[in-house]
């Protein structure tokens, strides 16, 4: 059985943000003994990844690290007409990925204790972001 | 329902290449109300990722960025006998990933307007590449 | 049909390790004409990726590369109280990913000849690691 949900995220500031609860509030996993949940982001300058759901400095260190490793204004960029944050946003999106796939067990996401779903918003003014959640059971 | 397709890609030059249309020309998504499409590449020196399908300088900037961040001839490489492009190709493949998973909705890939599927060819002479496409519905 | 397996990995030293055989020894793919296998790791400081299953220097070069590109003790880290290996471990985990999805064809993983599943153990003393394997057919 396949069920799909469209989720429109409000505009987030540039950086990494926990969105696990937003996703869980929109999907119905009850009665699913075993399955998979795929979250897909329909954008090329924002990403999804899984990491620590507790200390917020992990998320700010993510922003610092990816800003350092994917610099703005690199001398070799040709795709510069949408601003200095644009090409790095594309590169960060592919480095981190456009989707996450998570097991469902006994009606719940089978995440580790410390795992949450991050939105990586890589643009300065990314605006609303659209997710498609697909549940297999 | 599960359907699988083998796709043999012709040889591409080193760099990033849009392959969305090639994949769509080979799979039948008609009649699928909701599902997922997984594309898997059977190689360790090429990758799959999703990014902008419009301006080709995005793809050339991908090549420049990953060449800068995963350098050839790093002093610490031990796996050097297949040439200077080989170990970086392995590292790029794992940084970007071996597969992409995309929702299917109403008989079409539910990609964002600007999203396309990229082949990352990380070898100088990678030759033909084999994909396995799995469609769930 | 969905089948799930819990696999507890023994403690591995920091670095990259082939775990394909361990996974295959625990799952039953016989009789599956076409499907997908998803392996998910329930931790935020270890990762899963697919790369070369032959020369072990590929795996040691992975360790060298990610240590160079995700340094310990970066001046901008705020999340430092769990030790110098902790924040880099989170960043490596998200760069490489928390899960791999692999096609199943005719009762076998449809990997390329040179592909294997790597555990990326990014902590100095990561301890046991829990995997969830979900098989769709």
Image: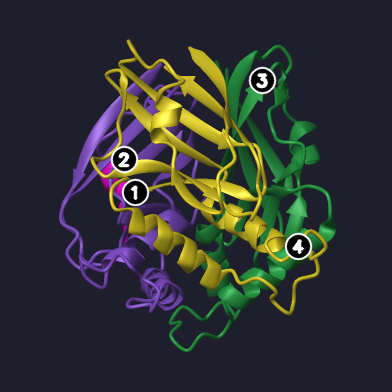
Chain colours: A purple, B yellow, C green
Residue that extends furthest to the bottom in the rendered view of this protein: C75
Which residue is identified by label 3? C105
Front of the two marks 4 and 3:
4
Relative to A85, is C32 on the left or the right? right
Residue B85, compared with residue B117, is above or below; it is: below
Which residue is identified by label 1? A20
Nearer-the-camera pick, C82 or B79: B79
* Spatial CA span between label 1 and label 3: 33 Å
* Spatial CA span between label 4 and label 3: 33 Å
Q: Residue A46 location in percent, x, y?
A: 31, 55
| Rendered residue at 65%/63% (across/down) | B88
Chain letter belonging to callout 3 = C
Callout 4: SS? loop
User: Residue A24's mark?
Assistant: 2
* Spatial CA span between label 3 and label 2: 33 Å
Image quarter where the C terminus of chain C lies is top right
Categorize mark 3 by other alpha carbons within 10 Å: few (<14), some (14-19), many (20+): many
Which residue is identified by label 4? B83
Region of the chain picked out in magenta, as a range: A15-23
Residue contact between numbered discs 1 and 3, judged by CB atoms under 8 Å: no
Q: Are marks 4 and 3 on the same chain?
A: no
Chain letter belonging to callout 2 = A
Chain letter belonging to callout 4 = B
Q: Residue B2 magenta-drawn?
A: no
């Amino acid at each position: 059985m396949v069920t799909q949900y469209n989720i429109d995220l409000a505009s987030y500031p540039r950086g990494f943000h926990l969105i696990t609860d937003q996703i869980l509030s929109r999907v119905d996993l009850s009665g699913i003994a075993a399955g998979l949940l795929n979250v897909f982001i329909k954008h090329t300058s924002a990403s999804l990844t899984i990491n620590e759901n507790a200390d917020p400095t992990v998320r700010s260190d993510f922003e610092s690290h990816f800003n350092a490793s994917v610099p703005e204004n690199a001398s070799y960029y040709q795709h510069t007409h949408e601003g200095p944050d644009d090409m790095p946003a594309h590169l960060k999106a592919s480095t981190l990925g456009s989707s996450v796939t998570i097991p469902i067990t006994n009606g719940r996401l089978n995440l580790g204790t410390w795992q949450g779903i991050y939105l990586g918003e890589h643009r300065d003014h990314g605006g609303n972001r659209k997710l498609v959640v697909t549940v297999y059971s």
